[in-house]
Amino acid sequence: MLDIGRCPECNVPEPFYQGHEWLNNGDIVQKADHRARMGIIECEALDPLFTNVGDIIGTSIYPLIINIAARGSKFYLDNLIPKEVKEMVQSKTMDLRPLAEPIFTMCHIMGFGQYDFLDYRYEKDPGDFARCNIYRPFSVPEVFGCYSGGVSAMVGGEHSVSYEEISPGLYEVVANGQSSRISSKKKCVSITIATKMETSSSSDAAPAVAQRLSPATIGTWLRAS
């Protein structure tokens, strides 16, 4: 069970209600940018639907879904992750792991699945990758596209996704160097952070930023400035 604060009235996880607003027309939008909207849907039929459409037209639409989800995820996270944090990651003065933890926590409470960050390489060349395990994604192509989009929001570019179901419901997912290729090793059956932060080019800033990004403080960090 995640140790996350909850709203005392409705029991919604704290990072979610602090990062979003409910409008009087029923829309749920990102506080930092009302163009980024949330949707609550029944997801069990999504992947069978995507598969059936592919069967009808004679080609899988998974690559299309992945690319659409990746661009939507990038848009959502671009508004959340402060520019200063991106600059520290891209200049390699901040490790990616402390940033991945609160983002993965947010994905978990939003129903995207359970994430476990494994490893990554970031040398700004085609050999770069970011690897994680995702357990019970609500939709294989949508969640994997969102993962690719998250990497894009952090380091730029568009990234291919490869994945393998290593046990029932558990996938190893890799966002690879900048590309547009989507691949699967095994056939599958079946989205801010806006706040003012002090700019620093010193690697000493990474622990402080990591603390602000910890699950205990993510709710505060999600508030729009």
Image: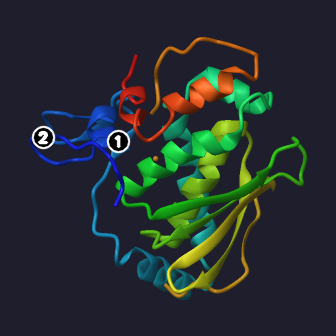
Q: Is residue 143 left or right of residue 8?
A: right
Q: Which residue is mark 2?
A: 8
Q: Residue at position x 89%, y 54% from top?
A: 127
Is 158 placed above or below 31 here?
below
Image x and y of residue 85, in percent? 63, 26
| Residue 74 lies in quadrant | top right
**Relative to 33, residue 146 above or below:** below
Q: Residue at horizontal 61%, vertical 49%? A: 149
On the question of residue 116 being in view, the answer is yes
Count of all numbered marks drawn on residues in the image: 2
Q: Earlier in the sequence, mark 2 or mark 1?
A: 2
Helix, strand or loop at disc 2? loop
Front-lying residue, 119 or 64:
119
Instruction: Residue 37: give its label.
Output: 1
Residue 43 percent location from the top left of the image? 34, 70
Please identify, in this view, whether the residue under mark 2 or under mark 1 is nearer the observer. Answer: 2
Mark pair 2, 1: CA separation: 24 Å
| Quadrant of the rendering where the C terminus is positioned | top left
Is the image coloured rainbow, by chain, by secondary structure, or in one colour? Answer: rainbow
Q: Nearer the viewer, residue 51 or 192?
A: 192
The picture places residue 102, in percent across and down from the top left corner, at 49, 43
Characterize the local packing of mark 2: few (<14), some (14-19) or many (20 or more) Cα atoms within 10 angstroms. Answer: few
Q: In front: 158, or 162?
A: 162
Q: Is residue 22 left or right of residue 173?
A: left
User: Would you place residue 130 above or below residue 141 in this image?
Assistant: above
At x 50%, y 14%, the residue is: 196
Q: Residues within 10 Å of mark 1 (few under 14, many from 20)?
A: some
Amino acid type shown at disc 1? Arg
Kind of residue sitting beneath label 2 = Pro
Indicate the quadrant containing the N terminus: top left, top right, bottom left or bottom right: bottom left
